[in-house]
Amino acid sequence: DLGLGLFVPFVVTIERAGVHNESRLWDTPSDYAHAIRYLSYRGSFGDARLGFRVGETHDVTLGFGGVVRHMNPLIHMDAPCSGIVLGFTHERLEGHVQVDDAVSPRAGGFSLTARPWGDLFLGGTLFADPRMPLSMTDGAGHGTVDQELGVLEPYSVDAFVPLSLFAGYRLSEKLSVALEGITLDASDREALGLLGHLKGRLRRGRLTLTGSLSGGGGGDHFQPFVADSFYLLRREAASGSGTPTLLAALRESRDPGFGMAAELGFSYSLSTGGTMEVKASFLQNRFAETGTLEALLVLPGKLILAFVGALDSQKNGIFSFEGRIALTDRWFLWGRAKRLFAISPGNDYYESRHQILAGIGYRQRSD
């Protein structure tokens, strides 16, 4: 029921200027707190089931995804990151809590779904970004860059707390529908919107197919799917060039917000006890079009391969490819290749960075 993984990274960066050790990994107490690569627990308390994980998270979706859909907390420089994911289920009640980083939190939220009777379900989602950048520069266009973390320091911030409420009905084991009302600012009528959702699932032997379709719109200051894979980049990627931040763009908009999203996936159970999963999604709103792809292959005791990638219409692209190969029952080889974003040294704009990590690990199983 309990899993724990520790890691001690020694990162060497290869650049045109030469090779140097990445010392920022061990500068502060929080760096040592990030030495917990993952801490997970799954158990039962009476009729309730509980799951908990501290570690890297590549995909965050809350509720029906009208606000947060496929957010990637690891979009910035590959500093250690320990997100929190907590889920519980009890009879007709289900909840999820997620925070992007337990040590230095920027954004988080929770969703709750209840099934009071029959196939009817009701729920809500709250997302919170207490220091959402409003302006990245002062009046003269000057900004501050944290070169070690590879991020811009905002000149001014404001709270961003979207809330959604949804209600739906399960038409059959294969199909369900739902309506979701969203406000990006409870004090602003122009920040209200309404979405419709359709979800389906089909099982044939070892194969399971899933699909969903969502769409809707709202007022001038409304935007569905506002927190997507590039949320942490788009929220602060404005500079002195006059490009507004995400929050400023929402408040300055004079056109109704709209958006749609579609998702398809399949999973297949292998005869060896392993699994193969693939999921692709696409979402569109007035700010960008974003596509995501996830793939997972698990051969128990032998091999694990995982891929997460995203691309948007602004030519931003991120990916993470990770693999683990068992050498013995306890020792394994591990590797990861990533494309992320960081501040270009000496400038105040983001550029893509590639990183390759590799290592050897040891695991101990206990009854």
Image (cartoon, rainbow, N blue to C red):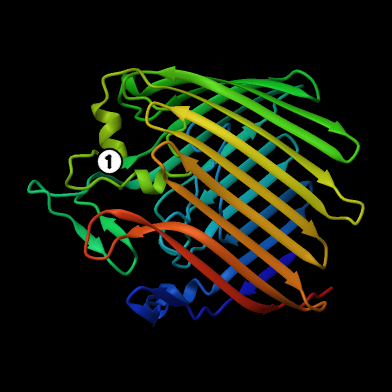
Q: Is residue 282 left or right of residue 24?
A: right
The residue indicated by pointer 1 is 245
- In the rendered image of this protein, does residue 58 appear above or below residue 62? below
- In the rendered image of this protein, does residue 217 appear above or below residue 343? above
Residue found at the far front of this picture: 16
Instruction: State which quarter of the image contains the N terminus.
Output: bottom right
Q: Is residue 322 left or right of residue 24?
A: right
Residue at image position (58%, 69%) is 37
What is the x, y in percent for residue 327?
78, 77
| Viewer-side residue, 192 vs 215 | 215
What is the x, y in percent for residue 211?
69, 29
Residue at image position (49%, 19%) is 216
What is the x, y in percent for residue 25?
42, 76
- In the rendered image of this protein, does residue 114 appear above or below residue 309? above
Task: State which quadrant residue 89 falls in.
Answer: top right
| Viewer-side residue, 75 vs 165 | 75
| Viewer-side residue, 16 vs 102 | 16
Q: Is residue 309 left or right of residue 284?
A: right
Query: Would you call the spot at circle 1 few (<14 residues within 10 Å), some (14-19), or many (20 or more)?
Result: many
Instruction: Give SS at disc 1.
Output: loop
Instruction: State which quarter of the image contains the C terminus.
Output: bottom right
Residue at image position (73%, 32%) is 210
Q: Amino acid at mark 1?
A: Thr
What is the x, y in percent for residue 234?
36, 43
Residue at image position (62%, 42%) is 95
